[in-house]
Amino acid sequence: MVNGGFTPIPPYLWTLDQRARALGYVGLRAYLDARYTHTAHSLHELAVELATSVWMVRLVMDTHGVPRLPGPQAKGRALQAVSDRHAIARAAALGFPDIRAYLLDRYAERAWPLPRLARELGVGVRVVRRLLCAHRVGRMQPTAAQMAAAAQARASQTARYTERRRARVAALGFGELAAYLRVRRVEQGWPLARIGAELGVGRRWLRAHLNTLELP
């Protein structure tokens, strides 16, 4: 019997508590809260750090009242945490103070696409998307280069459509669009839907060109 109200600590708890302290924590409970509850390390990772077995980790968690997640949920959370830590380490290696600073630079300011971010971080696109959501990082205003590229793309698309319509008008035996529209709309009285179907254009586009030519 031990006098003085002192309750001896089981040797296995004392040993693991000392290992937790050697890792920089004030005790085993603080270690479990930090590594499992907050940073989502798996039981296997805890066992490796404490130089013990997974079974023993479960035992000390129960002893200290640290709740464990169900198996599938714990596994999913642990895998997610591994991906997050990998991305954070990669961002740090690239010179960023944290992952949010990396995402702001690459995604918000430079407008990198998600696959490019994923390749640089060494994670999946789903991980990048989740990190963006978690850190509330979105696109900023497009840069001048991005706006210029978008304008060039729109101009190229317009040119392609114009050439396609010109070729269609020529195939129908007309020298220009205006002549075609006068014949179909004024002389033959075709409805807009029929003209649009023959040219392969939308009603809004067709109505705008008819208005320009002052045709009904």
Image (cartoon, grey):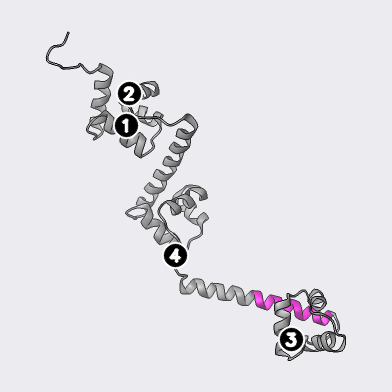
> Where does the N terminus fall, quadrant-wise?
top left
In this orientation, does residue 162 appear? no
Which residue position holds label 1? 32
Q: Position of residue 49 (x, y in %)?
A: 33, 30
Which dot, 4 or 2, sits closer to the camera?
2
Which dot, 1 or 3, sits closer to the camera?
3
Q: Amino acid at mark 3?
A: Leu
The residue segment tinted magenta is 157-171
How many numbered dots are placed on residues in this image? 4
Query: Mark 4 and mark 3 in contact (Cβ < 8 Å)?
Result: no
> Where does the C terminus fall, quadrant-wise?
bottom right
Which residue position holds label 4? 110
Which mark sits nearer the N-terminus, 3 or 2? 2
Which mark sits nearer the N-terminus, 4 or 1? 1
Magenta stretch secondary structure, dominant: helix
Which mark sits nearer the N-terminus, 2 or 1? 1
